[in-house]
Image (tube, coloured by chain):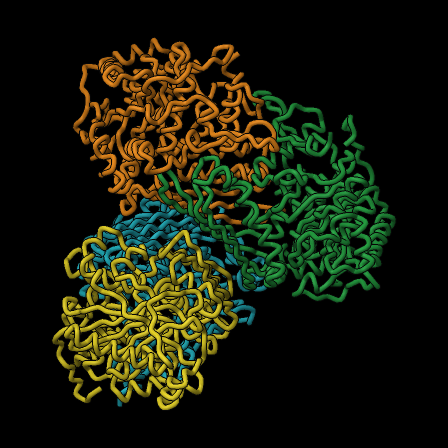
Chain colours: A cyan, B yellow, C green, D orange
Amino acid sequence: MNKDKNIKPVQGKLGVLLPGLGAVSTTFIAGVLAIRKGDAKPIGSLTQMGRIRLGKRTEGKNPLIKDFIDLPKLDDLVFGGWDIFEENCYEAAMKAGVLEKDLLNSVKDELEQIKPMKAVFSNDYIKLLNGPNVKTGENKWHLANQLREDIRNFKKENGCERLVMVWCGSTEVYIEKSDVHSTIEKFEEGLKNSDPNIAPSMMYAYAAICEGVPFANGAPNLSADIPALDDLAKKNVVPVAGKDYKTGQTLMKTILAPGFKARMLGLDGWFSTNILGNRDGEVLDDPASFKTKEVSKLSVLEQILQPDLYPDLYGKLYHKVRINYYPPRGDNKEGWDNIDISGWLGYPMQIKVDFLCRDSILAAPLVLDLVLFMDLASRAEMGGIQEWLSFYFKSPVCAPNLYPEHDIFIQLMKLKNTLRFLKDEDLITHLGLDYYYE
Amino acid sequence: MNKDKNIKPVQGKLGVLLPGLGAVSTTFIAGVLAIRKGDAKPIGSLTQMGRIRLGKRTEGKNPLIKDFIDLPKLDDLVFGGWDIFEENCYEAAMKAGVLEKDLLNSVKDELEQIKPMKAVFSNDYIKLLNGPNVKTGENKWHLANQLREDIRNFKKENGCERLVMVWCGSTEVYIEKSDVHSTIEKFEEGLKNSDPNIAPSMMYAYAAICEGVPFANGAPNLSADIPALDDLAKKNVVPVAGKDYKTGQTLMKTILAPGFKARMLGLDGWFSTNILGNRDGEVLDDPASFKTKEVSKLSVLEQILQPDLYPDLYGKLYHKVRINYYPPRGDNKEGWDNIDISGWLGYPMQIKVDFLCRDSILAAPLVLDLVLFMDLASRAEMGGIQEWLSFYFKSPVCAPNLYPEHDIFIQLMKLKNTLRFLKDEDLITHLGLDYYYE
Amino acid sequence: MNKDKNIKPVQGKLGVLLPGLGAVSTTFIAGVLAIRKGDAKPIGSLTQMGRIRLGKRTEGKNPLIKDFIDLPKLDDLVFGGWDIFEENCYEAAMKAGVLEKDLLNSVKDELEQIKPMKAVFSNDYIKLLNGPNVKTGENKWHLANQLREDIRNFKKENGCERLVMVWCGSTEVYIEKSDVHSTIEKFEEGLKNSDPNIAPSMMYAYAAICEGVPFANGAPNLSADIPALDDLAKKNVVPVAGKDYKTGQTLMKTILAPGFKARMLGLDGWFSTNILGNRDGEVLDDPASFKTKEVSKLSVLEQILQPDLYPDLYGKLYHKVRINYYPPRGDNKEGWDNIDISGWLGYPMQIKVDFLCRDSILAAPLVLDLVLFMDLASRAEMGGIQEWLSFYFKSPVCAPNLYPEHDIFIQLMKLKNTLRFLKDEDLITHLGLDYYYE
Amino acid sequence: MNKDKNIKPVQGKLGVLLPGLGAVSTTFIAGVLAIRKGDAKPIGSLTQMGRIRLGKRTEGKNPLIKDFIDLPKLDDLVFGGWDIFEENCYEAAMKAGVLEKDLLNSVKDELEQIKPMKAVFSNDYIKLLNGPNVKTGENKWHLANQLREDIRNFKKENGCERLVMVWCGSTEVYIEKSDVHSTIEKFEEGLKNSDPNIAPSMMYAYAAICEGVPFANGAPNLSADIPALDDLAKKNVVPVAGKDYKTGQTLMKTILAPGFKARMLGLDGWFSTNILGNRDGEVLDDPASFKTKEVSKLSVLEQILQPDLYPDLYGKLYHKVRINYYPPRGDNKEGWDNIDISGWLGYPMQIKVDFLCRDSILAAPLVLDLVLFMDLASRAEMGGIQEWLSFYFKSPVCAPNLYPEHDIFIQLMKLKNTLRFLKDEDLITHLGLDYYYE
């Protein structure tokens, strides 16, 4: 960030590049097109619907965020992406079955023109999918360079001023950070050797950062969350953010757990099960992909509850997460939670939460917000990890010496105070004693 | 509050006076006694279990609240109260059936010594109860003065340094503020005339404030929430707080609603039903008492959601609350909520929350916290409305020119920043950009 | 019934007359039209989808019911009815919002031709509705005769061989049987005097029975369930059946309660709440109409559980039913039940059932079955109460000296054995026809 | 069965031998002891609480089953069993934590006297348990003979007239019937060779049948359900019954599924998940044991729904069952089901069932009924498979040429008609004894 917090003004077109043109991406794109035409509202999007309180409660100043800070207009977005299937976005959206036919038909022409570029893909990382629209190359370095070329071509062909990349692809198998991820030199060497520890999603992140394109990661894959790419992002002053959209059950968890903790209610057990029937569910039927997702889903409670500080309350929490592929539901995911809490003197109580949600409907507005906020960060010259966007992620990435914040209310305050800070407004503390005592 | 925020140090005994010695009061008292003996933990109590973060995340400073700020010890509390039934606290606790017999027997001697003083009571205000242990007097002024005398006697007989009164009685019938409530002169005149608009709970509040005893109100009754008593409290530098303990379903509502709003998810409908079988349920079977409770329960969503600012999201919310007397459950209340939310492009989703809670187990630690924090406020010379204790109430009272805060996370931040402020610590904003950019 | 169980063969058209052309009726009619065209399946209809086991398990003889016994074909049905609104069936179905537009448009022409005849209606019996399409007459006798004329005209104009009437109108206010209902003479006298105890639905039933048209009652209204009309039905050899379609929550109750009883599990409490947003919900917001529905809904457990025979298990059951008008859901009703059961040594357990149902989708196939079975009963010369159709009703009508059967599994056995009996097949018992025909 | 259905009269003591003295067994035994003393009721037991209707509805004849047919009195029962742990029944019951301490202490003396005999046990069949109280022997033949000796000694030492054995042990790993199970000769040869396909539970069943002791199987293990033991049971005129107590979720399934089918409602998906924290849950964390249980739990829907006869309704049902070890709950199991049903024209609806049950509380009365009914069968000389007791089992065993009946209402009718048949009362059918006795 530059000292005087100068933010470059918005101008020209913003290209949105999406690895993975499946249910989430097409719901996002079709939705933006429908909203542009005035046929629907961007519900769930903080950048479009949200307001920010300025000053004191009694002043009544609550502008829309998009009026408060300079963000690209929806009309200025241009869409592109990669996928292992050849269907255009209209076909892919019809197959996904998330949005109603009437709505999709109203934006059919625009959707049909968005055709997936060939994807970098490997069954080593996603076992249960296969598709024909895949790049070939002699090694991973070669593949990564093809992606860089795609990015440059897209920008040129579409006359874009700036670009943003948001990962909307599948969950890869679980891997941990290793030596090849430690420095950019080793990483680039690894690309040339086709090191097996370099996942396809890392190549997308690498290509984006090399090209100066902000990269946000909607899956729990490591992707840009390795020292090599973090360093490169800081050096190139490119914003990176992740990981894993916080949508259904985990969203609820980061709402509820801060509530129980606020009240100092104990937690003995939290059992979460999911049933879902979309491509996501299919991929997660592979235990190796499920592991990646499970680690992401399990992490949230530990940080919020701080069992080391509150051993009497949270020291013995038994936390279990299950995901079940259940085709009758398609994209209409359902999460059921049983929560065993304890109160005064340790007396037990129970809470059950049944969430009949829609995966892509919850994720799409997050994609939009990330596109616009990542572009803002880029224009404000905020390179590297964007912790202030933790609000959007199940596994928020943060600086190595910090712990991630999972409490959604702290995340929101962090986000809004960052906006206030960027615009030199007073930060909010909710003290308010001045109303009572002069 | 005095300028230099001097807080009188804790010393001597603190008398706790409870109008209503039923399920909540006896669960609170028996629990404190058991905790003193080391037989149980004060789970649910922020003053006993809670910590407060000081400084930056990386400093790791999180003292217990009770170590951070000077609060009375549990050993220094002395208990007393009023009730329309003659049972001592052991008998009343056995009848309430909340705590296990083993636990109650372990503190039987102490409980048996707590015998209810005769109550000020009227069937005009609570229709479905009747009991023999009731004061008589020629008018309400006379009755109020008997209460003042009770307070002075209790203080003297128990050698208390200070007192706190917390209303734990039933919900009275619905009334609105009227002329007799507008000034202390009219109010005292009304007492002498036995004005029908002066409820028994107001006489308790009046007696407490006259005697310099902080008054907190755990029911939705108006009680101290009238200009006459507010003015008197400010004049006498006596803290007052209320109304209506935020326990089961409403607690959940003020956790969930801020979560939906954080994410800009729309709300089309919220249906809440309760089944409960204790004395509370019995009283609320009277429509006039239910009205008082309903108004309190309905108010929370309106303020949190701000439908005037977010008409597309919350302008058409249909909010309904039902309470059903259902004897098979006793004190083990159950709340079931159906929440109709909408996401991206207006697509509908549903959430069901089933809360198998225990009314008194959730309320008891709130009584403890209010006792200790109200005493703190008194020692800090903070007279009048204690908005910083909104955290504990369904209908938090605030200054006339303000709106009440219902979002439990803002309430908690307000509470903790008030403690930080009283101790001259930095307020927390969760900005944290300094970790990333020097 | 005639001795040799001769059933007149099916031939010609069967006219279906429906008082009330709202959500249920239009869902039924549009559905039959779509099924005729092969666009959908008559799921939920026993006459269309059901099979009947004949002989021993090892014989494997399970013909479809419609192949086993002579029933009208769907192609032979002709539809008509009365309503207080003037919309034709296409318009009414669109307004009801139960079926998808695509489906309704595929049968639009036929639906549009079905226009409601003017209804007999009174705000004394349904308080919260009002519509313009209403008959006038100097007294109730005159109004009833207009209905008889409507019936005759419909039959002639549509070339029907036979007719059936099925009440699909609203729930009237609660009344009990009184003197004017005791004999046909007093009833006809009452019509002439416009006796206030004669409800509109009774006039429809009277008109049908006079015209030899079987009458089935889908609402909890008394209608034909009075001695005057029962006697007339027997005399005219006209089948009558009722009352109140067994659809969502009560359907579940008559499935679950026999299960608990089979296992001799105790029941301490059963709390049922409903949220619904259709016209039905609107009408039931009137306490007088709700009373009628409540009596119907409460009755089922008492009979199934036989607390007099099982006082230790069911003697203290607390049963409560609530219905809440909740517009966000429209016709998509939701029923939530909490059931407190007890097992070995009296230990308590709980069951919660959340039923996200669709009112009209559950009711429509019942209308179809009743049309076809009532016509069968008529051709078999079975006059008066049709207890064997108890399967379809919340409040099954039976002979005065009997108790109604609510257990859905006994009801089904009774129905199927009746069919077997009519075709001289070996029985599986629970027949009970001998109570009606010597 | 003998021709004239002579049932030997009850006299003397009946010894109850239970392999496995864990939660179910001790809950059963302690319960019977408490009931004998008049301290509790045998809720859930058909033999103790149930009535049987005789004759017509109007006759009002509904005697208690235990008054209708000659069954042993609870006072005549004597208890014994085997376990791999050495605790006596009082200690085991305290550890199981199912019943309240007060109740257990009231029958402590009697419970303490019941000490487990050394068990036949193998980690090949139950992987996750280990205990010290285990028999040794040179081969399985030798072990089986030790069991026979135990049986004879128990009978003599306790002065029993007759014995019954009911398996209350754990679920063994999944195996299928193989050659060694085909004839008694091969089986006995296998015992001598310690054939790995002979499970411990089979040795118990073999020992019982050899000693003329009826054997009922409360787990899904094959045990007596192999041709070798079936033939031996018929030859020795010893009743055998099984398998797997029908308690929580599966009990609900066999109540609900017949209900949906009665109404011809379609089923698209049925997802069942369980959380439980007792020893049962621990054992089922082993995939091989879970497989045995899963097969048992999955089988019920297929038979009830007959997808071959109803392909439009049940041809595409997706049925999934999950069991999760979740320690916070102990014996208080919870089952959550999501059921996707379809109605008229295929419109989807959903039902959720949350069952907060108690495993051993549901199973204990089944043990009691099986003890008494198996003894009845023995006195009535009914050898081999007791299909009329299907009511009690998840996987009812039946003759090879038949399909098992899972519909709990048909099962109950079958049971009651068997009793009527034995007492020469008029039947309500579903008898089916002719499949077994010409």
| Numbered-mark total | 0
Image height check: is A323 above or below C276? above
Q: Nearer the viewer, residue C318 or C360?
A: C318
Q: Looking at the rendering, which quadrant does residue A20 occupy?
A: bottom left
Which quarter of the image is occupied by the N terminus of chain B?
A: bottom left
Residue D97 location (% of width, % of height): 26, 41
Q: Looking at the rendering, which quadrant does residue B193 occupy?
A: bottom left
Q: D199 left or right of B59?
A: right
Residue B85 location (% of width, % of height): 33, 64
Which quarter of the image is occupied by the C terminus of chain B?
A: bottom left
Q: Looking at the rendering, which quadrant does residue D35 occupy?
A: top left
Res. A364 in view: yes
Q: Nearer the viewer, residue C142 or B321?
A: C142
Q: Residue at x 49, y 14 (%)?
A: D5
Res. A377 in view: no
Q: B58 left or right of B412?
A: left
Residue D86 location (% of width, % of height): 18, 29
Q: D108 left or right of C208?
A: left
Image height check: is D292 above or below B344? above
Q: Nearer the viewer, residue D416 or C6?
A: D416
Image height check: is B304 above or below D382? below
Q: Residue at x 60, y 54 (%)?
A: C293
Residue D124 location (% of width, % of height): 25, 26
